[in-house]
Amino acid sequence: MNIHESAEDYLERILMLKEEKGYARSIDIAAGLSVTKPSVSFAMKKLRENGYITMDKDNYISLTEKGMEIAQRIYNRHKTLTTYLMQIGVDEKTAREDACKIEHDISEETFAAIQRQIEA
């Protein structure tokens, strides 16, 4: 499964919005990721073409099974890394920001070791 970091961010944000509000719209994605509405429109078109999302007639966005799998993986990494960073003394705001940067690049081996450390 090879997908660009920005696409992972969009999918993760859709999942977060669905959890927070019960729905996801382009305007909410733009605000949450601090990007322009045209950028979101372009990204949603690509995600839809690649089978990661669907959009209904009212432009509400839903994740497909394929999109949900990626979104959950990235969101789980984000939450786990945020928790870990806070456990080692990083303030919550910085931990969230740094987790966002790390979540895409960390190896499975390192992530698994961090998960074990949190559970210990």
Image (spheres, rainbow, N blue to C red):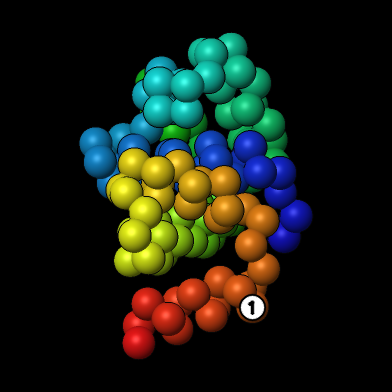
The secondary element bearing badge 1 is classed as: helix
Q: Which residue extends farthest right?
A: 2
Q: Indicate the quadrant containing the N terminus: top left, top right, bottom left or bottom right.
A: bottom right
- Vertical comparison of 50 with 1: above or below: above
For the question of whether residue 100 can be seen, the reply is yes
Q: What residue is rendered at 40% in x and 28% in y?
A: 32
Q: Position of residue 27 (x, y in %)?
A: 41, 18
For residue 5, which quarter of the picture? top right
Q: Indicate the quadrant containing the C terminus: top left, top right, bottom left or bottom right.
A: bottom left
Label 1 neighbour load within 10 Å: few <14, some 14-19, many 20+ = few
**How many circles with numbers are drawn on the protein?**
1
For residue 116, which quarter of the picture? bottom left
Provide the residue designation for mark 1: 109
Q: Which residue extends farthest bottom?
A: 120
In the image, what residue type sits under mark 1?
Glu
Q: What residue is rendered at 58% in x and 28% in y?
A: 44
For the question of whether residue 79 can be seen, the reply is no
